[in-house]
Amino acid sequence: MVQIIKDMDELKTFLKAAGSKLVVVEFSAKWCGPCQKICPLVHAMSLQYRNVMFANVDVDDSRDLAQIYHVKVIPTFQMFKKAQKVTLISRLKRAFCCNGSGIVSKPYLSDNGNE
């Protein structure tokens, strides 16, 4: 099920209720062709992945949320974990941490097979 979010209070409540589950928030608009095409896929994913919570923000109805989360194009998907936005930087930090600990140990090889 995809939860419709209309304002910041609803989003905060939704994120808090998610606890440690991953939250996927889609920013879209009713008039947006690509948004209309991806909507059934997002709904299907919400039914398939029960350990992930899905939400939708209509940027026309919730302009403040679109501005707060720097939505410039739609559809835009943003992910949250423990009420914090999951960013590329946080993912890179995790990758470097794991790499530094020896978990990822395969060296990078160039096209000619040399490191």
Image: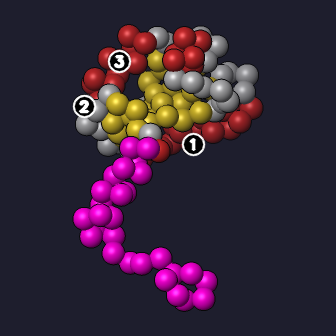
**Magenta residues?**
89-115
Q: Nearer the viewer, residue 35 or 101?
A: 101
Indicate the amino acid at tag 3. Answer: Lys
- Closer mark to the observer between disc 1 and disc 3: 3
The percent position of residue 58, horizontal first and vertical second, equals 59, 19
Query: Between marks 1 and 3, how big is the CA–CA gap?
Result: 25 Å
Question: Left or right: 103 with respect to 59?
Answer: left
**Number of marks in the image?**
3
- Are the residues flagged by discs 2 and 3 in contact, CB closer than 8 Å? no
**Mark identifier at residue 12:** 3
Query: Between marks 1 and 2, how big is the CA–CA gap?
Result: 24 Å
Q: Nearer the viewer, residue 76 or 48?
A: 76
The quarter of the displayed image where residue 34 is located = top right
Query: Between marks 2 and 3, how big is the CA–CA gap?
Result: 11 Å
Disc 3 crowd rating (10 Å Cα; few below 14, some 14-19, many 20+) is few
Question: Left or right: 48 with respect to 114?
Answer: left
The residue beneath circle 2 is 19
Rendered view: 83 above or below 110: above
Indicate the amino acid at tag 2. Answer: Gly
Indicate the amino acid at tag 1. Answer: Leu
- Closer mark to the observer between disc 1 and disc 2: 2
**Mark identifier at residue 114:** none
Placement of the N terminus among the 4 image quadrants: top left
At 59% from the left and 38% from the top, the residue drawn is 40
Instruction: Compare marks 1 and 2 and give the one earlier in the sequence.
Output: 2
At 30% from the left and 56% from the top, the residue drawn is 97
The residue beneath circle 1 is 41
Which element carries disc 1, helix, strand or loop?
A: helix
The percent position of residue 115, horizontal first and vertical second, equals 49, 83
